[in-house]
Amino acid sequence: MLTICDTCSTMMVIRIAPQMYTGEPYECETLIEIRHEILRTQKFKEKYPWRKEFKDKIHALSDTQVNTGGFKNYLDVMQILLKNITIDEATGKAFNLSQVDQKILARALDKQAAICTGDKGLIRFAKQEFEFTNIISSLGLVNIWLRKGLIQLNDVRLVFDDWKKLGEASQPQEDIKAFEKLTRMKYSGV
Amino acid sequence: MTKLKAEDMGWEGLKIKMLIKDRGWTLQRLATKIGVSRQSVTDWINGQIPKGHHLISLSQCLGVTPADLFTPKPDDSISVPAHRKRGSAKIKPATTAEAFKLAKEYKSLFFNDAAGARLTDVWKLELGEATPDPLSIKSIAQELRSESGISPDNPMNYRYVFKMLDKLGLVVIFRNFHEPKTYAFYSKIYGRHVIFVNTDTNIMDLIFALLHEAGHALLDRNGETFSDEDESVCDHLAGYVQFPDSYVDDTYESIKGLTPGEQINKLKYRCRKYGHSLHGVVTKIKGINPVFDLSVHGADTNLKKEFPSMGQVLFETSDAREYVDKLFNFTPSFMKIIISQLDTLSYKKLAELLELESTLDALEVHEELTRRKKAGRDNIC
């Protein structure tokens, strides 16, 4: 299934599968805004000093490719809902989605794709307003690639250690169990 | 006074009824087509906004766009952004529109800040509807100065101005405006008094502009635009707050009898020491001696080059922790709002609110804010 990845999930997995955006079997795509965010000069010290090594690997969809009728329709609806203050039923607070989050969801809805993200606000908004539950965690994506034979276990070990060091978001228990069952190895990440 | 309002989209459930009638449908027929109950359709007609996917199905069924089911309505949550007007110059509609757009980006944030503190009512009541007389303005200026903690005889510098604004309950937000000559503007968002500050502004130019905008907040015309008289009050208030009489008198005494070149050098020394512009203090001296006509434009322009912009102050180092420290120093109220909603703010949204171009930078900031929250700093519950 096609998967749209956001900035954080890309940074977590691209070293495991550098071809994630260039290789068709990976079925991943991302938006031009995400590419710009990853490659842009940072003001603060680098959490990911290696990121520019992947400049040629992060192929992103252009605005023309993304701006289909369906996409625009979904985006318009989201913008109207958010401008009218849509309350997150889980927290009682107004949803506070960024423009990029809205575009990621609009693309996923338009293409009936999944979203690889850990962004809880986006996940709850997608479920509440669009009954969208096709969310994959970074580890979930790794599991998919392992099952497809696109990556090897050696590709992941060092990166999992880095996830811990960098304080990346903890991964869902079900994905951790799935990884351990798939690889018969103890999961060493977050 | 002109009443301008932000506009927003209001749900028009009754349009569903009209559109069904045009098609000769019943409510039940529409409900069946969309796959919902008849009651759901009734609820939508009666004002409940449908969920996103229902909104799409509804508009497709009725052959309209989702926006067609909404109507522009005045948005009372945001007041008309007030910019400082100079003399007879008009604020361009595009400038106001841009400011509205910027203010709207913070709607959800302030909506969620229901329990936030409001502008101290005492101040507002004292200025009220009528135009205050000069003595009242001066008296208020002295009280504002003492709120900031500045020494009675010193001119305000930008650090003390930010302290004063925070004590008044004003929220400061740093953003880059497209119009470089717009230093700051004031707006009310869900009852919070907010001053947006252009990060391109030189800190010398910022002082008077911020004090002027504080004047707008204190006058608080409840969504009405500010009159020329109000602008004049804000200018006078800003002038009195920035420069106490004792400092102006002392400065004038120190340059009497000197050549223009010597006067400029002496004034520049004071400007560098206390962090204010030549133009500002010369304007005040003219209040004592109207024939004082020292030309300082060129010298002032050159002097300002020695001082950074607000953006340069904020991003002086490449350390996210120092950046966050500075934000808490200059705009503690805004940062408390951010930190209180940190659990529901994504890195991408945080990047937008703080205008960090890189989400990866926002990630660093988010981590630092989380660390501070866990450490129980900043009196965050």
Image: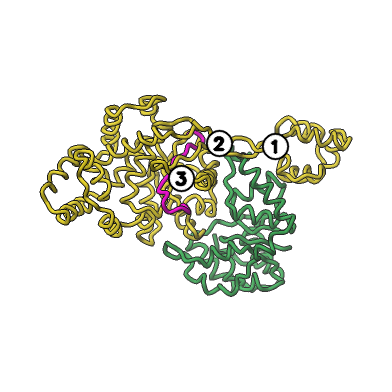
* Rendered position, B174 above or below B191: below
Could you tell me which residue is drawn at 82 percent across and 33 percent down? B38
Q: Colour of chain B?
A: yellow
Could you tell me which residue is drawn at 36 percent across and 51 percent down? B325
Mark 3 vs 2, N-terminal side: 2
Amino acid type, mark 3: Ile
Residue labelled with disc 3:
B339
Highlighted magenta segment, given as a residue range: B177-191
Q: Chain of mark 3?
A: B
Disc sitting over residue B49 in the figure: 1
Residue B342 in sight from this viewpoint: no
Disc sitting over residue B123 in the figure: none
**Label 3 to label 1: alpha-carbon separation:** 30 Å
Q: Colour of chain A?
A: green
**Label 3 to label 2: alpha-carbon separation:** 30 Å
Image location of residue B21, percent across then percent down? 85, 33
Counting every numbered tag in the picture gives: 3
* Rendered position, B225 above or below A148: above
Amino acid type, mark 2: Lys
Q: Nearer the viewer, residue A121 or B109?
A: B109
Q: Nearer the viewer, residue B308 or B129?
A: B129
Disc sitting over residue B5 in the figure: 2
Image location of residue A42, percent across then percent down? 46, 64
Amino acid type, mark 1: Ile
Is residue B188 highlighted in magenta? yes
Circle 3: element type: helix
Q: Quadrant of residue A95?
A: top right
